[in-house]
Image (cartoon, coloured by chain):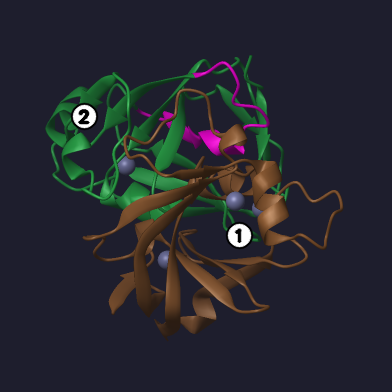
Chain colours: A brown, B green
Amino acid sequence: MRTGQCLCGAVAYRAETADTVSVCYCKMCQRWASGVFMGVMTERFDVTEGADHLGVISSSDWAERGFCKMCGSNLFYRVPEPGYLSVAMGSLDDTSGLTPRVQYYVDKRPEGFALAAETKEMTEAECIAFFAPEEGDSHDQV
Amino acid sequence: MASKTGSCLCGEVEYELAEEPTSYGACHCGMCRKFSGGIELGIQVPPGGVRFVPTDKLALYESSDWAERGFCMLCGSSVFWRFTGEGPLEGMFSISAGTLEDMSGMTFDAEVYIDHKPDSHSFAGERTRLTEAEVLAAAGVETGDDG
Ligand SMILES: [Zn+2]
Ligand SMILES: [Zn+2]
Ligand SMILES: [Zn+2]
Ligand SMILES: [Zn+2]
């Protein structure tokens, strides 16, 4: 079990997380999280404090993002159906034991940016084929 | 070439830079990591080097005695960090690099607060790497707080 909170402390949560970090370079994550989104998948996620300060925005037809309305900290990325939530790595109080294992949208990765770790890499086309095979439409972002 | 314009995820907060940015850096301090979701990538912009399209959706959070952070209150995008103290950095912005329409052609040339970087990740390549003490000395700040 890990705990996390935003920068100002208004929103806090408790989560059971995996030890793997998924990195996303899609333009939505870039705009939202300053360039790169580092998500840690959860098995269970509960807001323990400040639910009324939690802002949630629908960022696509299937996903939403949670943040603190007081300080703007990025808190999570969630796909309500079927129910998938990854917390922003930066919001965790302790990141020990976490390792990046996969990088999404690597063809959109900012020039000059490279993690030292070797991970699985998926391009935009591979991500869309993997995550939204039936959509087949113009979504270029997750 | 990178663009001079940028916006948050939902598009409510938009800006235009006076000059095309050529480089970006990362800050590993705990505050930037919380604010940005894990890795803060920013471009340094001097005061007056950015014009925000007027909006009432740009919220400010005072994160220390000498810095504030701007974010979109509708979508939560981390838009900037700004030095509000006195000294050589007064009014300096670090605008979130990912908000740029286009980051092409930029170099990743600096990492600051390198002594605060968690072990969970590090970046390949050579660039300027400064500790907290080195950054504070350059900024003329005497407190030991993160910004
Ligand atoms: Zn907060
Ligand atoms: Zn993404
Ligand atoms: Zn926005
Ligand atoms: Zn910082």
Q: Which residue is mark 2?
A: B135
- From mark 1 to mark 2, how far is it between C-alphas? 30 Å
Q: Mark 1: which secondary structure?
A: loop
Whole-percent x, y for residue B45 in the image: 48, 24
- The amino acid type of the residue labelled 1 equals Met
Q: Mark 2: which secondary structure?
A: helix
Q: How many badges with numbers are in the image?
A: 2
Taking the spot 36% from the left edge, 47% from the top edge, the residue there is: B32
Q: Mark 1 vs mark 2: tell me if same chain.
A: yes
Judging from the image, mark 2 belongs to the subunit labelled: B
**Viewer can see residue A9:** no
- The amino acid type of the residue labelled 2 equals Val
Whole-percent x, y for residue B68 in the image: 40, 46
Quick one: label 1, few (<14), some, or many (20+) residues within 10 Å?
many
B13 relative to B90 in the view: left or right: right
Q: Considering only vertical position in the picture, is B144 above or below A3?
A: above
Taking the spot 67% from the left edge, 57% from the top edge, the residue there is: A130
For the residue with label 1, is its CB less than 8 Å from the closest atom of ligand 3?
yes
Q: Considering only vertical position in the picture, is B65 above or below A53?
A: above
B76 relative to A102 in the view: left or right: right
Q: Which residues are magenta?
A: B90-106
Whole-percent x, y for residue B146 in the image: 24, 47
Judging from the image, mark 1 belongs to the subunit labelled: B
**Viewer can see residue A90:** yes
